[in-house]
Image (cartoon, rainbow, N blue to C red):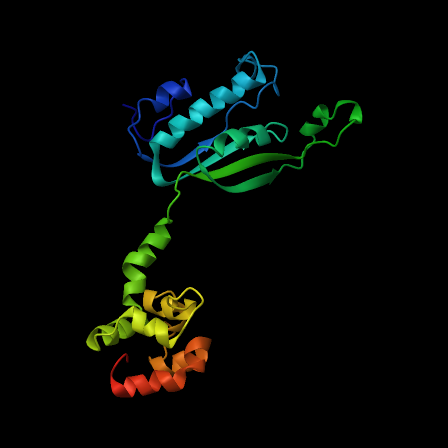
Amino acid sequence: MLEINSIYNMDCLEGLKQLPDECINLVIADPPYYKIKDDEWDNSWDSFDDYLDWIEKVMLECKRVLKENGSLYVFGDDERIAYIQVRLDKHFTFLNHLVWHKPNNMPIKYAHNHRKFCPMSERILFYSKQKSKTGLECVEEKYVKPKNPMSTYLKSEIERSNTSRIDIAKLFPSKTGGLTGCVSNWLNGDNEDKCYGGNSFRPFHRLRHNSSCFYSNRKKFYWLRNKKRIL
């Protein structure tokens, strides 16, 4: 087992195999770029396909040790990074292709005979293995939206009046036959930005000014409130 706060000079695959599943929050990988340098470590593969196979193998181990909401950054050369992305897109959720601007004279030696532009950047692929909601979205769903005053108010009135969502959908018809988008958003708590502003909570005032479907049906809305069927 590898110890934390330590630096290890070893084969990355061997090191990764000593880590348990889903124990890492962030992986920053700067692998060899393949035959950019003359050193042995950058020329250890018989072909470019062998190199891509190795990259994919390492990244699969990185995926194993990454937590569900962990992040992965992979550095690469501008000529190679597209091929790497094709491999990694099969296993991770692609988020960004970042360009690291490096304005120095070193890349000039790679512009052979001035036949091509000097590469003045390196590339970074940003991935997550998460396919579901982000951590922030999960917190909002579990803790923020249920406390939305408008959502809480509407749900309590619907329960008190023993009214179903089908009854509400009949009042505010949609093409799908279900709840319209704005009604659904209010019930789900998705419009919390309209309710958390420090001002006193005046639900009907906000409905009239912030929701077109409620606004256009406000006479029915208030009539039903007076009848105590929905609100």
Relative to 200, 75 lies left or right: right
Q: Position of residue 90 (x, y in %)?
A: 47, 32
Q: Position of residue 107 (x, y in %)?
A: 68, 28
Relative to 213, 149 lies left or right: left
**Residue 35 found in image quarter:** top right
Q: Residue at x 41, y 82 (%)?
A: 217
Using the image as rendered, state which of residue 132 and residue 27 is in the foreground: 132
Using the image as rendered, state which of residue 227 and residue 27 is in the foreground: 227
**Residue 206 found in image quarter:** bottom left
Up-down relation of residue 62 to residue 172 (above or below): above
Q: Can residue 168 be seen? A: yes
Q: Residue at x 28, y 67 (%)?
A: 147
Looking at the figure, which quarter contains the C terminus?
bottom left
Looking at the figure, which quarter contains the N terminus?
top left
Up-down relation of residue 119 to residue 36 (above or below): below
Count of all numbered marks drawn on residues in the image: 0
Q: Residue at x 43, y 24 (%)?
A: 58
Q: Residue at x 67, y 28 (%)?
A: 106
**Residue 57 found in image quarter:** top left
Q: Position of residue 202 (x, y in %)?
A: 34, 82
